[in-house]
Image (tube, coloured by chain):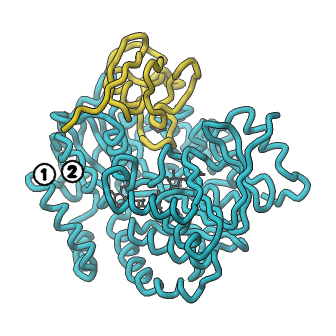
Amino acid sequence: MPMPEQIEITVNGTPVRVPVGTTAAVAILISNIFCRTSVRGEPRGPLCGMGICFECRAEIDGIAHRRSCQILCAAGMKISTDLRQDV
Amino acid sequence: MTSAAKTEVDTLVVGGGPAGMWAALSAAECGMRVAVADDNPEMGGQVWRAELAKTAPEVAGLIQKLREAGVQLLAGTQVVDQVAPGVLLAEGDGGASYLGFGKLILATGAREQFLPFPGWTLPRVIGAGGLQALVKSGLPVRGKRLVLAGTGPLLLAVAAYLRAHGAEIAMICEQASRSALASFGAALLRQPEKLLQALSLRKALTGIPLALNCWVVAAHGTVAVEGIDIWHEGKVKRIACEYLACGFHLVPNTELATLLGCRLVNGYVEVDEFQRTSRPGIFCAGEPTGIGGLELSVVEGKVAGLAAAGREKAARKFFRRRRMLGAFARAMDRTFALRPELKNLVEAETIVCRCEDVSYAQLEREVSWRMAKLMTRCGMGPCQGRICGPVTKFLLGWSPDSVRPPLFPVTVGTLAHSFSGCNVDDNQER
Ligand SMILES: Cc1cc2nc3c(=O)[nH]c(=O)nc-3n(C[C@H](O)[C@H](O)[C@H](O)COP(=O)(O)OP(=O)(O)OC[C@H]3O[C@@H](n4cnc5c(N)ncnc54)[C@H](O)[C@@H]3O)c2cc1C
Ligand code: FES
């Protein structure tokens, strides 16, 4: 089976290589970090995976609060999450 | 305010899942000018997501037929408001756009029902369909240990999918009772095609422990889920896992129908035999009329598309099949109805509204959804109550109040279009 083409993005400044077709939410999950910090300061990650719950919000290419599960990674994309703590 | 693009068609379909795609094709084949708007990056809806559309010949073929029939496929287009009769406002990557139509078919599908329990807000506690969607969009699960908990056939379908992608399924916890499932089995026997699906699923799941009368009571972990407690046969048992996938059946997406003034009965959009809603010229097909699964959505889509094109006689040909599939859907609803014990999983400090971090204790003090919104901000966050609304309906018996535009958070530019409208003076009552 041919390997899917890989692209490089950064998650909180760290370079990550992902196959074409990977969403930003997945890039965050495989980096072992979470997406956002809740009103009371709890870590949160994707819940619905389909654009409804807004739990996967992250800053993507400088725009805050984007639903990372609905956005495909593009070469050079910069994803930043609220907190840099490991999951 | 920048000017917005405008699409003008005879029949507009909102939702590009099985119901919407078949509605569009049926109407287009009758000579109508048709467009389909869907908020996802690609057409397909919940079952036929990107990965499948590329590989499954059936779906690829359908998309090809839609193109040949001249249907405009507006992917990445989220309908957020009605700005005038016959004109919807949508938002997409390219900004705001107006969608003008003669007839409208709502095929907005369903989402998963969630239920709160201590620890359900931990990262890696994910919806069952949600986890499947993440795997379809690249999440590797090979070698990961996971548990599926909740109810309904979706749990099994997702478990089979995840196993095929290398996941180790520690357990499937189904809340329905053995007796409920036995009568469902009888309904299955009357539907050869469903039975075959069930049998092939059973084969795909060989060796995975499936516990009935069983549900998750808590999830534990410091930053993400590390283990869960399940209730089974009178005992609490701890299971280690790296993901917990939960799904407590489905909730119809009725927000747009409600915004347009279509009548709802028991939470579903009311339709007649031609899938006509209570609003003239507005049809509805698929999950919003009742959770029925793929085949029923397809048939309802065909009826709606033909009826919207004025071909009532052709539409009648599908009534028999629709009746049969509808009976099966009702049997499913009965079998997988949520048991009352699940209402007791929340503790006082359990978060119910995840957007605003509102706890169960805060909500218990309120008398209605409306008061809870005012006093606690429950349902006021970006999901606009799509997750906590169905939860409070189950836990506290609240019904959501009217729906307010925009249906989803939008950019300021789109909001400006929403306020100004196309023709604000003949804007209809909301
Ligand atoms: C997560 C999940 C997984 C599922 N997996 C299976 C499965 O494996 N097998 C099975 O038989 N059934 C499955 N189902 C059940 C599924 O609902 C039906 O089988 C089938 O997808 C229903 O088709 P539909 O066309 O009615 O709705 P959907 O397929 O849900 O399509 C509706 C579409 O409308 C879009 N939409 C909604 N509102 C708007 C708006 N305002 N603007 C623009 N677009 C909008 C949605 O994003 C969606 O793409 C699943 C359901 C869910 C929620
Ligand atoms: S995971 Fe729910 S919106 Fe992205």
Q: Residue B131's x, y, as percent?
A: 33, 42
Which residue does the numbered mark 1 point to in the structure image? Answer: B209
What residue is shown at x 38% (from left), y 49% (from top)? Answer: B344
Q: CA distance from mark 2 to mark 1?
A: 6 Å
Chain A painted colour: yellow
**Split into 4 quadrants, where in the image is the N terminus of chain B?**
top right
Q: Whereabouts is ligand 1, in terms of quadrant?
A: bottom left
The residue lying toward the viewer, choosing from A65 and B44, is B44
* Local secondary structure at mark 1: loop
Q: Residue A33's x, y, as percent?
A: 36, 20
Determine if the C-beta at disc 1 is less than 8 A from ligand 1: no
What residue is shown at x 69% (from left), y 33% (from top)? Answer: B411
Q: Amino acid at mark 2?
A: Ile
Which residue does the numbered mark 2 point to in the structure image? Answer: B172
What residue is shown at x 57% (from left), y 62% (from top)? Answer: B70
- Chain under numbered label 1: B
* Crowd band around label 1 with a 10 angstrom C-alpha radius: few (<14), some (14–19), many (20+): few
Q: Amino acid at mark 1?
A: Pro
Chain B painted colour: cyan
